Image: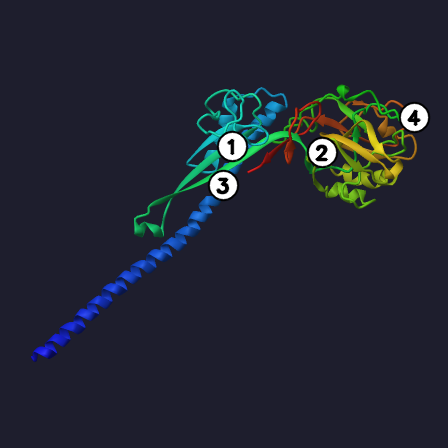
Amino acid sequence: MNRSRWSATRLRERQRGQVLIIAVLAMIAMIGGVALVLEGGNAYAHQREAQNASDAVANAGATVLAEQLGGGTKTDKDVATATTAIANANALTSYVGYYTDVTGHMLTPAGVQTTSTTAAAHVGVGPIPTGAQGVQVSGTQTFGTSFASVLGMNQFTATADATAVTGVLSGGRFLPFVFPINIVDCQQNGDLGIGDTNWKLSNPPLSNPPMKPHPDGPEYIVPLCKTGAGSFMILDLDGIPNNCAEEVTNPPALQWKGFPVDVATDNGNNCAKKMVDAVNALQGHVVMVPICDGACETQGSGSHATYHIIKVAAFFVDYMSDSNNNNSLCQAGTSPTYATLVTPIRGNGSSSCIAGWFVRYITTGPVGAGPVTGADAIGVQLIK
């Protein structure tokens, strides 16, 4: 064979070999790129799982602290048991929890704010610090790879942080009426009673299964009557007057940064009658009700007044009644629903009333600083 022809043949074969190597390398790079794209979606899904799991763990720890705020005897072991159970249920590989104050700042075992995770009081390590009203969680979830294994990446780890706090409920979905601190009397002279120190709190019935269909404790009849300024205790929470039944069936979501706060009244005399069916449909449910102080009204009269709201209470609904005449259901000594004894209104000034139980209740919603006292509702809020 001619040497020049032989050299040309060898050159073409060498070029084909180089193209084959480049093609193989390009294919490996393409497979690796596709694998990383697909694995990125998998990693994102696990990151969301880790975040949701960390949120749930923080909420579980804060709920135990909420029970402590409500008067329950709770320890660090209770917090650790609750958080570990939720971490396992949500497939976290590991987590670490720290106690915080109501603003989400970590606390030392002595109850002092700190930014150091080393100095912070750990869940499951020691007693609950003084002033602890929250739990900060850092959770991890390790997961195997699929396509990325061709690149030697056999597992990834997703990490997520969350903080949940508890305190006095300062926001949420409230019913559009107000209870005065004084609930026992409702006489024609506007006297509203003898004070909230006489309210006795009950625990809500266990719902799964119910041990009783109602709370175990005293039932009260709460008047929706005229105050000294002539206003009925009905609130306008959504700024739309006279849509009272709609505000019961679809309570507006509100957040008050703190108390006290002034809230406008609605046309109470007309609204009470409209609300009866909607409120009675909530029989057996716990509702959130704004509470006004002894002064109650701040200005105006009739439907042009505002109420001085100082806190939120939880109320287990039995029934609501409205009548223009002497209302026997607002004077009853026995509930027609549960045959339980009720504390009736003394006097004859109320033609509208709601009967039920004040309960110690924990729910989700915005919370504020300050002590939990009396019939205050307690909230658990995920803040980050």
Tag 2 residue: 288
Q: CA distance from mark 3 to mark 2?
A: 30 Å
Mark 2 surroundings within 10 Å by alpha-carbon count, few (fewer than 14), some (14 through 19), many (20 or more): many
Measured Cα–Cα span from mark 4 to mark 2? 28 Å
User: Residue at point 66% right, 26% down?
Assistant: 370
Residue labelled with disc 1: 136
User: Dot 4 corresponds to which residue?
Assistant: 189
Question: Which label's residue is closer to the chain start, 1 or 2?
Answer: 1
Circle nearer the N terminus (1, 3):
3
- Amino acid type, callout 4: Asn
Q: Looking at this view, is 152 or 10 the one in front?
A: 10
- Name the quarter where the C terminus is drawn: top right
Q: Residue 16's image quarter?
A: bottom left
Q: Is residue 348 left or right of residue 147?
A: right
Element on which disc 2 rests = strand
Mark 1 to mark 3: distance in Å?
A: 13 Å
For image coordinates 90% across by 33% down, the residue present is: 230
User: Where, quadrant-wise, is the N terminus in this rendering?
Assistant: bottom left
User: Dot 3: what SS?
Assistant: helix
Q: Specify the quadrant of the image occupied by residue 259.
A: top right
**Amino acid of disc 2:** Met
The residue to which callout 3 is attached is 51
Q: Position of residue 271 (x, y in %)?
A: 84, 40
- Amino acid type at mark 1: Gln
Q: Is residue 193 visible?
A: yes
Label 4, label 3: how far apart the Cα atoms are: 57 Å
Q: Position of residue 83 (x, y in %)?
A: 50, 30
**Of the pair 302 and 334, the residue shown nearer to us:** 302
